[in-house]
Amino acid sequence: MTAAVVMALANRAGTFGWGSSFARARTFVGGQFAAVWTEPSRRDALATDLARDLELSVRLADERGETVGSFGKACNGSPVTTPIKHDGRVVGYVDLCDVHHHHPSFFLPIAVAIAMLWGASGAIAHRLVRPLSELARVAQDIGRGQLASRVRLSPRQGMEFMMVGNVMNEMASRIEKQLADQRALLATVSHEIRTPLSRMRLLIEFAREKAAANLARLVELEAALGRDAAKVDASADVAPGKGPLHEMAQLEREVTEIDALVSDLLASSRIDFTALTRTDLDAIEVAKNALERTGIDASRLDVSGGPIKFSGDATLVARAVSNLLENAKRHAGGVETLRVEAHAGMVAFIVEDSGPGFAPGDENRVFEPFYKRPSVASNGEESVGLGLALVKKIAEAHGGRVFAENRVGGGARVGVELSR
């Protein structure tokens, strides 16, 4: 196409002179025949010479277009008509036509030229595009979290592209270092936070045991003095709902809530840092461990079929199933059933509860961070609204999804599907 356009423009501009030469040839033929048109013998001799010497088909016609003579072989294409003028009046016409049959070898040089031009332009295009493809590849890798990917270009591929590649490599190195520093900082901070939390829980347990022991001694002492034990309990301010034991129980719940929040933040950060460690897991064992961890009876487990194997991050998958159970236990009236199903290359953990179900529109909003359903009672336990949001992030990191829906007859179903 490039060659055809260049030749056409050059011809139009007169570079090759084809257009002007053809016009002059027609003028010459018209002038020659005009000089002998009134002499049939000389006119026919001129037509015979043209047909023989130029290998053309020549047709002579009068001013009405009727044939007055044909010379040479039959025409194989469209003839070129030249009017014959005498004293400013058209007295006849001459039709000239090529009689050659173009042999296939005629097109061979054209085909070779096109192939060479196409190959050369393709090589040039590949040379120009390859650096851009390399830059695009590395940009996609960085977007997917593969920060170790680097641009590999040489100076002969263009200094400009190489400069851009060096900038991208430096950017990826800085991001990789920053994320590594954040991972180390996160691990350190989580350890520093959990250590005092563990100590607090231990101190609370010691304080509870000491308070219980003191109360027992007080009861024994008062009993020895003849006082009523029930009155002693009331006077000691340890009745249910008040007193130091009740306050310690509240403090322990707060510590447990902080510990759960730290665990959720750590799990969310692992996903953000793409720090997943996939191993082969047994879905039934994951479900049993989650029930045990949340203090729910194992009889709530319902499994369809035999063992269900899949690949996933053990810590994150366990956190996702535990969060589903904790959500139903705290905010949805309790867990009725934990179902484990496998279908179409996916494994699903589905928690069915006995709560009030979802209000219209809540089925999707419950997976938004920090969203709390105002109509749902929490049994006195507050939540920051990260549990189900974390379940969604874990599902997406494992190529799966989350879902929530109301059950027929009351309650709701909240589940997570993970790729096997």
Image: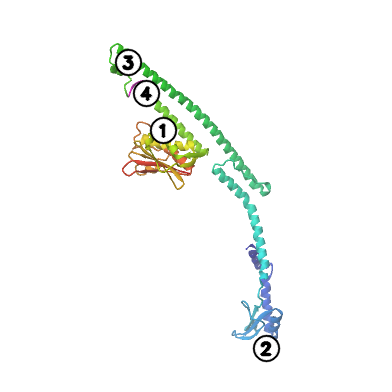
**Label placed on residue 219:** 3
* Residue at screen point 37% across, 17% down: 213
Quadrant in which the N terminus is drawn: bottom right
- Residue occupied by mark 4: 247
Q: CA distance from mark 4 to mark 3?
A: 21 Å
Q: Earlier in the sequence, mark 4 or mark 3?
A: 3
Rendering coords of residue 291 (x, y %): 40, 35
Q: In which quarter of the view is residue 10 placed?
A: bottom right
Marks 2 and 1: in contact by CB < 8 Å? no
- Residue occupied by mark 2: 40
Q: CA distance from mark 1 to mark 4?
A: 27 Å
For this orientation, the residue located farthest to the top is 225
Which amino acid type is shown beneath numbered disc 2? Answer: Pro
Which amino acid type is shown beneath numbered disc 1? Answer: Glu
Q: Earlier in the sequence, mark 1 or mark 4?
A: 4
Q: CA distance from mark 2 to mark 4?
A: 133 Å
Residue 159 in view here: yes
* Residue at screen point 46% across, 23% down: 199
Which of these two is toward me, 255 or 25?
255
Query: On screen, 372 above or below 41?
Result: above
Marks 3 and 4: in contact by CB < 8 Å? no
Q: Earlier in the sequence, mark 3 or mark 1?
A: 3
Please indicate whether residue 246 sits to the left or right of residue 43 in the image.
left
Q: Is residue 107 magenta?
A: no
Could you classify mark 4 by the number of other residues whose Cα lies within 10 Å: few (under 14), some (14-19), or many (20 or more)? Answer: some
Query: On screen, 124 above or below 31?
Result: above
